[in-house]
Amino acid sequence: MPTETDKLALDNLNFDNRFIRELPGDPEPDNFRRQVYNACYSWAPPTPAKQPRLLAYAREVAEDLELSAETCESADFCQVFAGSRLAKGMEAYAMCYGGHQFGQWAGQLGDGRAINLGEVVNSRGQHYALQLKGAGLTPYSRSADGLAVLRSSVREFLCSEAMHHLGVPTTRALSVMLTGKQVVRDMFYDGNPQIEAGAVVCRVAPSFIRFGNFQIFTARDDLDSLKKLVDYTIRTDFPALGEPSIPVYLSWFEEVCRKTAEMIVHWQRVGFVHGVMNTDNMSILGLTIDYGPYGWLENYDPDWTPNTTDAQGRRYRFGNQPKIAYWNLVQLANALYPLIKRAESLQQALLAYTETFDKGWQAMMAAKLGLLAFEPAEDDALVNELLQLLQAAETDMSLFYRQLADIDLSQESDAVRQFLAMLQQTSYEPLSDEVIERATIWFETYQTRSQRDSRPQPERRAAMNAVNPKYVLRNYLAQLAIDQAEQGDFSLVRDLLDLLRHPYAEQADKESFAAKRPDWAKQRAGCSMLSCSS
């Protein structure tokens, strides 16, 4: 049982639950599935865990919350962050929102398996919203049980932290707990349900507000609630824009467009595929949110999606993510239109997304190739040919860019040979004669282009290694960690967490984690494709 000393640490957290204090709530106090109107949230107490057990926690997130290692390893930490006890100041609620799913309006969605605990303010005045995922039913659970399982919880926990250390805007994860409950899940919706271990992740972010939070009110013609939520969001998360007004609404929407574009550029940089870019999974702060059926590109394939639900249409494939983000922003613009009533101004604000993404993508590709700047007249063709080449050669994206930095371009006679050897080594299939010929021509063009920058090799290598990670959360590594965790061994989860804290660093004893995907993982469930199942 938690000691009084244990409890004191968590009960001393400083909560300032502005969201529920300042916005309209659901008057119904009981927690049952229903349609909720004229409210931003509903009360939703977590379901107590049967036998909570700490699997892992992120010390950097704990430090932001000013929690010690002793507190995070205490019995009370397990109780609170598995949903069995609310610490002093916590007020449990679920948000109401709607959204477009796979391009179609889905109506009310809401936090179906996420329960917010409130907002912690640390001694530096930083606000952090805490949210449990998998802690039980809410009014928005629809036909589901509000629970989550170990495999999806480990994936969310690890990827949240991996993305942060990669420099990608993201929500964070404080902890992942086993609940001691058994949960039934049909992983691929194929009529083969299995019993799995239940788990809860504590997610952390400045705000969990999504595009869908605004869409639901416009869809229901509840403009009073829409205005209250927009004004609240601007005042709390975008205060530098000034007091809410129509010009400020437009400036705010433009800022959301820019932040979204910056996030997508980072996704494309590291080879991350979200898998389910519905509007209810788009953060108003431009943070990666909701790690469901995500995946990492191994062999470069812009048409790849990790989501079995998306396997036919491939709407959320890697190469389509920039366009989908724009489409989602258009839906947000439609939701905001009743407050602004200036279609042309909203359209103009949307240009901020296109301009930010285009400039960001060009700068990102120049950095990945070690170029000082992107010169469109020449570099458009250079990059387009490279991406086609990587796809044709089935090249491992992460390994290719990392190892390209090691080739000294000043060695005229040997550089081509080194490049072709590297390309074969980082590809999943033998190179055809046609691919070798294309690769040779591309590399010679790249070599000439790069030499024009007169960048010393050590500087070029360091610059490339700063943006091209050596270690990412490869799909098969996450699955191996899950396999071990399901047997009660959490060591690989913790090893991966430690590895991914330094994704750009050379870690001499961790070379095996930077290897190509093994053959056994190419088609294995959890390594190649996943579903939206929790």
Image (cartoon, helix red, strand yellow):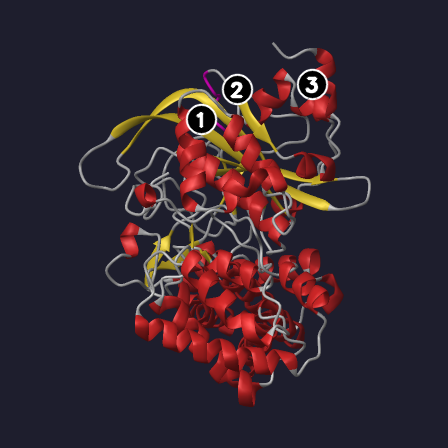
Q: Secondary structure at mark 2?
A: strand
Q: Which of disc 2 and disc 1 is earlier in sequence?
A: 2
- Residue at x-position 46% and y-position 54%: 281
Disc on res. 53:
2
State which tag comes first along the sequence, 3 or 2.
3
Q: Is residue 256 above or below residue 380?
A: above
Task: Give the image location of residue 372, x and y in percent.
Answer: 67, 76
Task: Give 406 or 92, whichever is nearer the viewer.
Answer: 406
Main secondary structure of the magenta stretch: loop
- Please state, as top left, top right, bottom left or bottom right, where the N terminus lies in the image: top right
Q: Which residues are magenta?
A: 46-50
Q: Position of residue 485 (x, y in %)?
A: 44, 26
Does the segment drawn in magenta span residue 47?
yes
User: What number is the disc on residue 525?
Assistant: none
Rendered position, 479 above or below 339: above
Quadrant (top left, top right, bottom left, bottom right) of the C terminus:
top left
Residue 346 appears anywhere in the view: no
Question: In the image, what residue type sits under mark 2?
Answer: Arg
Residue of label 3: 7
Secondary structure of residue under mark 3: helix
User: Residue visible at 48% across and 15% down?
Assistant: 51
Please name the amino acid that badge 3 sits on: Lys
Horizontal arrangement in the rendering, residue 236 relative to residue 342 (left or right): right
Find residue 485 and name its label. 1
Q: Is residue 338 left or right of residue 69?
A: left
